[in-house]
Amino acid sequence: LYTSCKGKSGKKILIINEDPAIVTLMASYLKEFGYKVISKPPRMFDVKQVKKIAPDVILLDIDKIEEWGVAIFEILKKSNSTKSIPIILMASKLTEEELKEVAAQLGAEDYVPQLFEFADVDRKIKKVSSRKPFHSP
């Protein structure tokens, strides 16, 4: 699924989520905020593809089968080509406190709780994507 940019942002957002309904909903709203949205189900995850896509931010679902979400997070953060991409965790089956704890344990840039406003997601994306990652020479 690739949705072209309607608004001003032009930032690329990669959604890694197994639920097509959530992906469709997120993509349609993020498009309204001006983002280019690319999605991949976790079973299609490939760090080389993430490098080619070069997203500005990744929205990663960690609660369908928690192990794959955490594993994908760790792979992205260990790979030289993807470790500087900010990751915002999502989880519809965790409470906000549980998700906050997992995000802190993993070192995620932010998280989106089960109940959220799209304006909050937009604000979080802008916040984490405006940080300048450290690049060694």
Image (cartoon, rainbow, N blue to C red):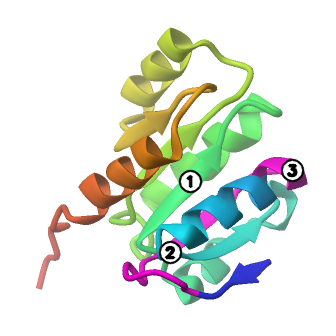
Q: Which residue is mark 2?
A: 35
Residue 122 versus residue 49: which sits nearer the camera?
A: 122
Q: Are the residues flagged by discs 1 and 2 in contact, CB closer than 8 Å?
A: no
Q: Please name which of the two marks, 1 or 2, marks the residue nearer to the observer.
A: 2
- Residue 77 percent across, percent down from the top left: 44, 55
Disc 2 residue type (three-letter)? Tyr
- Residue 44 percent across, percent down from the top left: 83, 67
- Residue 22 percent across, percent down from the top left: 78, 48
Disc 3 residue type (three-letter)? Ala
Q: Is 18 positioned to the left or the right of 12 in the image? A: right
Q: Earlier in the sequence, mark 1 or mark 3?
A: 3
Q: Which residue is mark 1?
A: 59
Residue 12 lies within the magenta run: yes
Residue 34 versus residue 92: which sits nearer the camera?
A: 34
Label 2 environment density (alpha carbons within 10 Å; few <14, some 14–19, many ≥20): many
- Residue 31 percent across, percent down from the top left: 59, 72
Q: Is 49 positioned to the left or the right of 121 in the image? A: right
Residue 34 lies within the magenta run: no
Q: How many marks?
A: 3
Label 3 environment density (alpha carbons within 10 Å; few <14, some 14–19, many ≥20): few
In the rendered structure, which segment of residues is drawn in magenta? 5-22
Q: CA distance from mark 3 to mark 2?
A: 18 Å
Q: Are the residues flagged by discs 3 and 2 in contact, CB closer than 8 Å?
A: no
Q: Which residue is mark 3?
A: 21
* Residue name at image x 73 percent, y 30 percent: 63
Label 1 environment density (alpha carbons within 10 Å; few <14, some 14–19, many ≥20): many
Element class at badge 3: helix
* Residue name at image x 55 percent, y 86 percent: 5
Q: Can residue 131 be seen by looking at this rendering?
A: yes
Q: Quadrant of the N terminus?
A: bottom right
Element class at badge 2: loop
